Amino acid sequence: MIDAYTLEQCKKDKRIRNLKIKNLEHAIEQSEAIITESKMDGDSLNFLRRKVADTRQDLEVLYLMNDPE
């Protein structure tokens, strides 16, 4: 979950928001690659999948901030 300070900065500055979006997209890609190639136990994989889902929700919030409507 994005903390309140970061969210406020993303609202104020489009450059910060776009950088955060880029970072989250990269983190999701890397996490999905780890999940695909992983030999981790089921509990660890489930934890990582939940984190990816949370990150996707954060990313959606930032995408909505970019929406001009």
Image: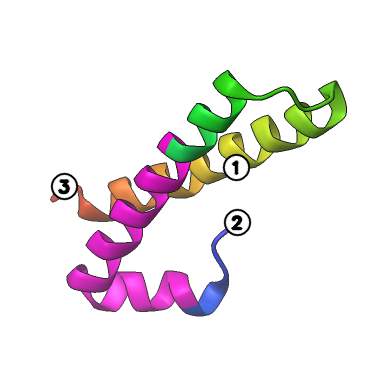
Q: Is residue 38 magenta?
A: no
Q: Which residue is mark 3?
A: 69
Using the image, determine if residue 24 lies above or below residue 43: below
Q: What residue lies at 30% left-to-right and 46% top-to-bottom?
A: 63
Residue type at mark 2 is: Met
Decide: few, some or many residues near mark 2? Use Cα within 10 Å; few <14, some 14-19, many ≥20. Answer: few
**Residues marked 1 and 3 touching at CB (< 8 Å):** no
Point out the image quarter for the N terminus.
bottom right
Name the one closer to the observer, 16 or 46.
46
Residue 4's quadrant in the figure? bottom right
| Element marked by disc 3 | loop
Q: Is residue 9 magenta?
A: yes
Q: Which residue is mark 1?
A: 54
- The residues bearing labels 1 and 2 have C-alpha atoms spaced at a distance of 6 Å
Judged left or right of residue 54, residue 28 is: left
Mark whose residue sits in front, 1 or 3: 1
Specify which label sits upstream in the sequence, 2 or 3.
Answer: 2
